[in-house]
């Protein structure tokens, strides 16, 4: 089925898609060149509060902001943070607004008279638009309130809320991908809405390992691996599955997985250009089965494989665009088989938001342009980071932005975590430096 026909069918099946497409057209049809309100509100993602120092990820919005933008975040940046991004990386100066506390950033902003007053004044001056991490209902509530107070709709670089929720729901997206690309474009899966259906799915799916996933979560949260060899053994990376986790997506975990590419897309408003592919990343994982995301590296796939991957991704992006999607999106695939050249290419997830890899892809391009060197990225843990000054730490590391970029320092104080990207002359060299050289340099810098 072609994208236009499927888009019409999906709009018929979900009337709210068509309602939002029409009602929010004024927020979608142009993205102003002026300042942006940039925020990372992830409160609507199930189980996100299980991540250590989850509130600190709000500070990651800084790397999507440019000169003159306003950045919303409840926590304050650590020492040396703004100077690093403004001066060392050349991202320009921003205005920070801190409305309150907690994960619910949009709701905190609505409750802050000072923040709302400043945002409304900027909106009335003209040119202001909103760049959310995730265009959730809470974000749209904030946009609606600002637009009403300013007397004009604020453009939003994000999809309408119902489309955003559907696209982030694997139980909706995988069947849609199969309808567009064919049944063989997705792994075998079932949607379990009861414990009986869950038990049946574990029996039916033809795989040694089966994954049970909370369908709207992220970063491996709510993912439970089951060894179906009698008796079935559940080995959860997170808390045990409960009835509250249903409905769940149950996926046959196909093996051997040769690579897990993630394709990073930008989807402009309909009639304002075609979706574009900004890069392909090979995801890395810290466990043999590939359930715990640990970073990624610039892909170097055979040309026919890369071309097919981009073609499938752009077809899915076009479908989302026809439904009213705007903004960043990434699609995760697995390549299964004995050889990359003839491996099965299966779509496993849609990240209808910015994500852990897309923020890095965007930042490296912002600092070094489109013709940047290959890079690898991941995160380092060290309790000594909790008391570190970011500026001093960067100086002691002795590595400049041509070779090393810190893309998330928001979790230093709360979790002793530092997220870095390492650039080198090849993906293999970048990954080697990330795994071997940078931890040694960090240890010396913290002494």
Image: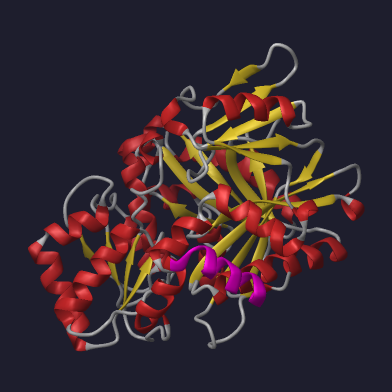
The residue drawn where x is 41% and y is 31% is: 244
| Magenta residues, dominant SS class | helix
Q: Is residue 216 visible?
A: yes
Residue 138: percent from the left, percent from the top?
A: 29, 58
Front-lying residue, 82 or 289 = 289
In this rendering, would 63 be left or right of 177?
A: left
Residue 42: percent from the left, percent from the top?
A: 37, 51
Residue 424: percent from the left, percent from the top?
A: 68, 58
User: Which picture quadrant has residue 141?
Assistant: bottom left
The residue drawn where x is 68% and y is 65% is: 313
Residue 9 lies in the magenta stretch: yes
Q: Which residues are magenta?
A: 4-15
Residue 405 lies in the magenta stretch: no
Front-lying residue, 1 or 335 = 1
Front-lying residue, 430 or 70 = 70
Direction top: furthest residue: 231
In this rendering, would 386 be left or right of 17?
A: left
Q: How many labels were placed on the picture?
A: 0
The residue drawn where x is 35% and y is 38% is: 49
Residue 400: percent from the left, percent from the top?
A: 52, 59
The residue drawn where x is 54% and y is 88% is: 271
In this rendering, would 350 be left or right of 38?
A: right
Direction left: furthest residue: 113
Q: Is residue 371 visible?
A: no
| Figure check: 333 above or below 231 | below
Quarter containing the N terminus: bottom right
Coloring applied to the structure:
secondary structure
Quarter containing the C terminus: top left
| Figure check: 199 above or below 193 | above
């Amino acid at each position: 089925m072609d994208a236009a026909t499927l888009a019409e069918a999906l709009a018929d099946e979900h009337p709210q898609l068509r309602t939002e497409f029409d009602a929010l057209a004024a927020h979608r049809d142009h993205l102003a060149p002026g300042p942006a309100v940039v925020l990372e509100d992830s409160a609507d993602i199930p189980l996100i509060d299980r991540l250590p120092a989850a509130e600190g990820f709000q500070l990651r919005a800084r790397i999507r902001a440019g000169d003159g933008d306003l950045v919303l975040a409840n926590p304050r940046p650590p020492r040396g943070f703004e100077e690093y991004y403004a001066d060392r990386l050349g991202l320009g100066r921003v205005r920070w607004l801190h409305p309150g506390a907690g994960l619910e950033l949009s709701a905190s902003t609505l409750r802050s008279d000072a923040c709302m007053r400043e945002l409304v004044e900027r909106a009335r001056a003209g040119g202001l638009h909103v760049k959310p991490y995730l265009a959730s209902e809470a974000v749209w509530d904030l946009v609606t309130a600002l637009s009403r107070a300013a007397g004009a709709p604020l453009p939003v670089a994000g999809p309408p809320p119902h489309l955003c929720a559907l696209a982030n729901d694997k139980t909706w997206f995988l069947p849609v991908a199969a309808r567009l690309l064919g049944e063989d474009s997705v792994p075998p899966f079932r949607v379990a809405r009861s414990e009986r259906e869950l038990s049946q799915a574990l029996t039916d799916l033809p795989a040694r390992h089966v994954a049970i996933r909370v369908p709207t979560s992220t970063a491996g949260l709510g993912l439970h691996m089951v060894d179906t060899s009698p008796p079935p053994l559940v080995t959860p990376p997170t808390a045990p599955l409960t009835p509250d986790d249903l409905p769940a997506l149950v996926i046959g975990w196909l093996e051997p997985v040769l690579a897990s590419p993630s394709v990073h897309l930008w989807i402009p408003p309909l009639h304002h250009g075609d979706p574009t592919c900004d890069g392909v990343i090979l995801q890395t994982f810290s466990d043999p089965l590939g359930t715990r995301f640990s970073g990624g590296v610039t892909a170097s796939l055979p040309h026919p494989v890369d071309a097919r991957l981009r073609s499938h991704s752009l077809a899915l992006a076009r479908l989302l665009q026809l439904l009213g999607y705007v903004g960043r999106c990434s699609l995760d695939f697995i390549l299964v088989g004995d050889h990359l050249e003839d491996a099965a290419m299966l779509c496993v997830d849609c990240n209808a938001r910015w994500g852990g890899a897309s923020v890095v892809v965007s930042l490296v391009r912002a600092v070094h342009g489109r013709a940047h060197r290959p890079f690898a990225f991941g995160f380092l843990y060290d309790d000594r980071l909790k008391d570190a000054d970011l500026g001093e730490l960067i100086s002691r590391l002795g590595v400049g932005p041509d070779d090393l970029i810190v893309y998330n320092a928001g979790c230093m104080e709360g979790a002793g975590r530092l997220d870095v990207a390492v650039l080198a002359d090849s993906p293999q060299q970048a990954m080697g430096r990330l795994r071997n050289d940078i931890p040694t340099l960090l240890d010396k810098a913290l002494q």
